[in-house]
């Protein structure tokens, strides 16, 4: 007979590990938060410093790795920016972009302008009664009605449904792109003209020195099917390398999370933007470059304790630390392993529970093929991505996206193979 109290403890711990970011503007979520980056290598501080040191505008691209706590840290960045006197608009692009199809500068500009317009109704920004006379979606409705033969249903729906159409209707997106073919500069000017009106309205309410920061999160979720992955990746590269100068907004600092593979081309990409910067978002550094345990492990232990009774799911703290080390500082992998430990604990806590959990977690990254192992071994030995060419480079881009390669930050960025497969890669 299962103990009902233990069952309730399992459930509470399980739910606290759900795959969702924390919102540090929310008091309850702050109770679950534990700072994991040290002060010297805090990516949030680096982003905030660049905003404050760059004058009136900048574009920072953050090559994001899914599951490394980036969105939670973006909420901390939002909180810190507000406290530093900035006005902040944070957008989850998952709500606007079809993450399984190619991206294009034309609909991307429209989506960004529309998303910013949506956020203005927040009481902290303009409020519902003091917004612009027309939202960007309403302006866009007028533009499209005269420039494309939209589907009859789209013409009849409220302007707000343009958001849904751009996200979910590939045929409609193609019509929009065709409508602005040969008129891209006009589109850029229209978006920037509207944005200046946004700034005027914000400064009327918040004072003439109001400084705006726009955080665009989750674009790293762009991922095509196996057959379309290459097309999606090429579309991302084209948008940022060919149209980078068109993405920035006047008198505005922008922080955009982008797919991890763009980190490989960071030096060339930063030059596309005014006060541009590209950084990889690091995993939490549970070991240093020599493989020695760091104090980050202790912080992650405290984080797990905030989430629930791990001590009832694992035999001891050594087992918990084994899972932390096996995660490579990749929080989602750690949380998934803890969820597996919760399931196993229902049949009694075993002395080798951590070994069993790690074995299950490793399967998600297997199998690896001979040529893949060769590339991963090179990265493991050099801790860098230099001297990779052709097919090797293509492998690395895929490994970064899949989490097989993790990025870390000491005084510079370095890379390593995920601990779950490192022994396989090194043949040890």
Image (cartoon, helix red, strand yellow):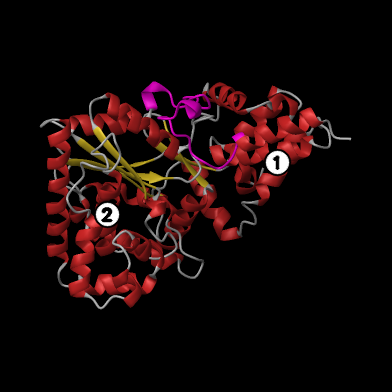
The residue tagged 1 is: 340
| Residue 348 visible in the displayed image | yes
Q: Does the magenta stretch include residue 23?
A: yes
The residue tagged 2 is: 114
Crowding at mark 1 (Cα within 10 Å: few <14, some 14-19, many 20+):
many
Could you say where residue 399 lies in the image, as x and y percent from the top left?
A: 50, 53
| Residue 387 visible in the displayed image | no
Q: What element carries label 1?
A: helix
Could you say where residue 285 lies in the image, as x and y percent from the top left?
A: 49, 31
Query: Along the line of sight, which residue is nearer the eye, 320 or 182?
Result: 182
Q: Is residue 168 above or below residue 54?
A: below
Q: What residue is rendered at 26% in x and 70% in y?
A: 177
The answer for how far apart the CA atoms under marks 2 and 1 are is 41 Å
Could you say where residue 291 lies in the image, as x and y percent from the top left?
A: 55, 30
In the figure, residue 165 lies in which quadrant? bottom left
Q: What residue is rendered at 28% in x and 30% in y?
A: 48
Instruction: Write the start and end of the magenta stretch as one range.
Output: 16-41
Instruction: Count the marks.
Output: 2
Q: In this view, does 54 lie above or below 318?
A: below
Q: Is residue 51 left or right of residue 215?
A: left
Q: Is mark 2 on a helix, strand or loop?
A: helix
Could you say where residue 382 lies in the image, as x and y percent from the top left?
A: 46, 42
């Amino acid at each position: 007979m299962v103990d009902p109290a233990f069952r309730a403890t399992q459930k509470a711990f399980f739910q606290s590990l759900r795959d969702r970011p924390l919102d540090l503007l929310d008091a309850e979520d702050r109770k679950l938060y534990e700072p994991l980056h040290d002060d010297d290598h805090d990516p949030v501080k680096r982003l905030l410093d660049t905003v404050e040191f760059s004058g009136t505008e900048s574009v920072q691209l953050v090559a994001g790795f899914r599951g490394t706590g980036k969105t939670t840290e973006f909420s901390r960045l939002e909180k810190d920016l507000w406290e530093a006197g900035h006005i902040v608009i944070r957008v989850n692009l998952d709500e606007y972009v079809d993450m399984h199809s190619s991206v294009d500068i034309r609909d991307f500009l429209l989506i960004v302008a529309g998303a910013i317009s949506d956020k203005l109704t927040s009481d902290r920004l303009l409020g519902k009664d003091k917004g612009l006379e027309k939202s960007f979606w309403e302006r866009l409705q007028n533009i499209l009605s005269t420039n494309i033969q939209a589907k009859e249903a789209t013409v009849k729906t409220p302007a707000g449904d343009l958001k849904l159409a751009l996200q979910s209707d590939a045929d409609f997106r193609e019509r929009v792109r065709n409508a602005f073919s040969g008129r891209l500069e006009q589109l850029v000017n229209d978006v920037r003209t509207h944005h200046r009106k946004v700034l005027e309205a914000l400064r009327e309410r918040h004072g003439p020195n109001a400084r705006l920061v726009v955080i665009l999160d989750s674009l790293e979720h762009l991922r095509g099917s196996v057959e379309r992955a290459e097309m999606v990746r090429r579309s991302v590269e084209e948008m940022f390398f060919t149209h980078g100068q068109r993405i920035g907004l006047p008198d505005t600092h922008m922080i955009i999370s982008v797919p991890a593979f763009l980190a490989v081309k960071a030096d060339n990409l930063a030059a596309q933007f005014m006060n541009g910067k590209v950084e990889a978002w690091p995993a939490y550094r549970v070991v240093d470059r020599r493989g020695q345990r760091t104090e980050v492990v202790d912080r992650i232990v405290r984080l797990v304790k905030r989430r629930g009774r791990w001590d009832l799911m694992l035999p001891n703290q050594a087992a918990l630390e084994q899972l932390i080390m096996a995660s490579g500082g990749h929080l989602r992998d750690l949380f998934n392993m803890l969820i597996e430990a919760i399931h196993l604990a229902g049949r009694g806590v075993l002395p080798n529970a951590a070994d069993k959990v790690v074995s299950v977690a490793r399967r998600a990254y297997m199998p690896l093929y001979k040529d893949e192992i060769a590339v991963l071994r090179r990265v493991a030995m050099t801790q860098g991505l230099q001297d990779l060419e052709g097919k090797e480079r293509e492998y690395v881009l895929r490994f970064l996206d899949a989490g097989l390669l993790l990025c870390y930050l000491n005084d510079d960025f370095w890379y390593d193979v995920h601990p779950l497969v490192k022994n396989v890669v090194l043949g040890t």
